[in-house]
Image (spheres, helix red, strand yellow):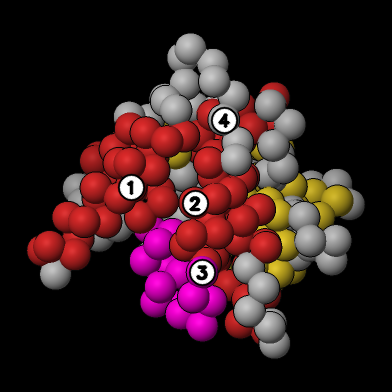
Amino acid sequence: MSYPTDVEAADTPMWIAHKVIHQGAEATVTSGSWMGKSAVLKMRNPRGYRTPHLDRKLTRQRLSVEARVLGRLQYHNLTSPSLIDLDLEQGWILMSKIEGITLYDYLNSKEDSNTSVINSFGKIIRKLHEVGISHGDLTTHNVLIDNNGKLSLIDFGLARILPELEHLGLDLQVLNECLTASHSEFENAVNDMIAGYLSIDSQKNNLIPAKDVISRFNEIRGRVRYHA
């Protein structure tokens, strides 16, 4: 199966593009339909500062990891887009579309300072880490919330499988910086995220304990403050 590189002008009956929902440096994300079902097509953008060979290699690697991550999340029943198809050579991945708005927009529209949703976000992050995945870009732009308050992680383009402790701590630091910069009105947000994270701990032998991840996060946070 081969979709046109111009995802907006796709003329295949299998994939019908509707609109570009995100235009970033790394990728263009387009919403549409695939066989009548809502879907999202993510196409990696060529980076001019890389040699073509290196750019193609990195694109293949990142898309391959993203596809494996989606498969692992589905296997463990964690809410996330499901993989429909991908083309490593053309540099795209097709996924099911999850309805909802970003947590960023949700928090910015709230009229109260209740941060229970951020506690729930912390729980989801821990579940993600427990299945052996670090996200790599954990911001409130990369989690959706539906009308029932259900949270779903998206955009695993920078994810790692079987990450080290440092990567898990960095996930929390990225979110810490996001909450501090973009949602400063929620004063207890970071503490609520930590509480949610610590409340989920399966105690399996092959898992890095939640408390160790929080310790590394605090260490990273201290480093950032020191260098700042």
In the rendered view, would you say 63 is above or below 208?
Answer: below
| Overall secondary structure of the magenta section | helix
Q: Which residue is mark 3?
A: 188
Please, what secondary structure does the residue beneath circle 2 have?
A: helix
* Of the image marks 1 and 2, the number of the one nearer the N terminus: 2
- Mark 2 crowdedness (10 Å alpha carbons): few <14, some 14-19, many ≥20: many
Quote the CA–CA distance across marks 1 and 2. Answer: 10 Å
The residue stretch that appears in magenta: 174-188
* Of the image marks 4 and 1, the number of the one nearer the N terminus: 4
Q: Quadrant of the N terminus?
A: top right
**45 sits left or right of 109 in the view:** left
* Of the image marks 2 and 4, the number of the one nearer the N terminus: 2
Q: Which residue is found at the position 42% from the left and 36% from the top?
A: 211
Percent x, y of residue 14 = 79, 47
Amino acid type for the residue under numbered disc 3? Asn
Q: Which residue is mark 4?
A: 201
Q: Which residue is mark 1?
A: 217
- Asked if residue 53 shows in the view, the reply is yes
**Residue that lies at the very extreme toward the bottom in this rendered image:** 111
Amino acid type for the residue under numbered disc 1? Phe
Q: Are marks 1 and 3 in contact (CB under 8 Å)?
A: no
* Of the image marks 4 and 3, the number of the one nearer the N terminus: 3
Q: Which residue is mark 2?
A: 194
Percent x, y of residue 177 = 37, 66
Percent x, y of residue 203 = 54, 20
Q: Which residue is found at the position 49% from the left and 51% from the top?
A: 194
